[in-house]
Image (spheres, helix red, strand yellow):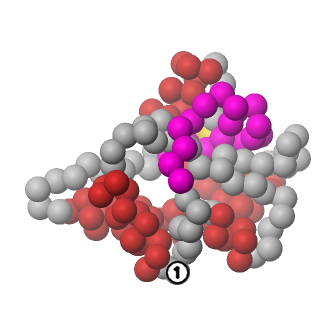
Amino acid sequence: MKHFIKQNNITNIIVASAGFKADSDLSSFSNIHFDRMRQLNISTDGFSRTSFNRRLIDEFDIIIGMGKEHKDYIQQEYNERIYLFNEVYKGVGSSITVPPPDKDGNYLVQIADMVDYINQAIPQLVINLNRMLPFKNGGIS
């Protein structure tokens, strides 16, 4: 999304990224996402793994999670409602799931497909976010 808003000179949306397991060692697993993004000419320069925390809820007006487990966690831990990616994109409450590694390597294709799905959805996601304006602080996470 950062790439898209930069390429399209969109200034009313600020994007941050955070994860619940940002301190875990998933480096080889996570590189699959970055490799596919580079194949799509999407810069990943400056990316760093950031743990989700309360400050993000306070700082950003809209928090988007990939899966229902993210939504449930935020509700339980912070008593806050967040949106699922597919809720903002298509108006449906379905999760985007990261497939676990398997012995046959099928997850490599599934992760590439997931990156493609998210990348293709970003233009519509931005349109839908703009419909949700005004943001009180001017950003999303």
Between 138 and 109, the one nearer to me in the picture: 138
Between 131 and 122, the one nearer to me in the picture: 122
Residue farthest toward the left in the current orientation of the protein: 103
The percent position of residue 21, horizontal first and vertical second, equals 43, 38
Asked which quadrant contains residue 18, the reply is top right
Asked which quadrant contains residue 124, the reply is bottom right
Amino acid marked by disc 1: Asn
The percent position of residue 81, horizontal first and vertical second, equals 65, 29
Relative to 78, does residue 111 appear above or below in the rendering?
below
**Residue identified by numbered label 1:** 41
Residue occupying the point 33% across, 45% down? 25
| Residue 57 belongs to the span the image colors magenta | yes
Circle count: 1
- Residue 91, visible in the rendered structure: no
Residue occupying the point 11% across, 56% down? 103
Residue occupying the point 46% across, 42% down? 22
Relative to 40, does residue 10 appear above or below in the rendering?
above
- Residue 56, visible in the rendered structure: yes
The percent position of residue 55, horizontal first and vertical second, equals 70, 32
Could you tell whether 34 is left or right of 76 in the image? left
Label 1: which secondary element: loop
Between 56 and 92, the one nearer to me in the picture: 56
Relative to 101, does residue 104 appear above or below in the rendering?
below
Between 4 and 72, the one nearer to me in the picture: 4
Could you tell whether 99 is left or right of 131 in the image? left
The percent position of residue 63, horizontal first and vertical second, equals 66, 41
- The magenta-colored residue range is 48-66
Badge 1: residue crowd in 10 Å (few <14, some 14–19, many ≥20): few
| Residue 63 belongs to the span the image colors magenta | yes
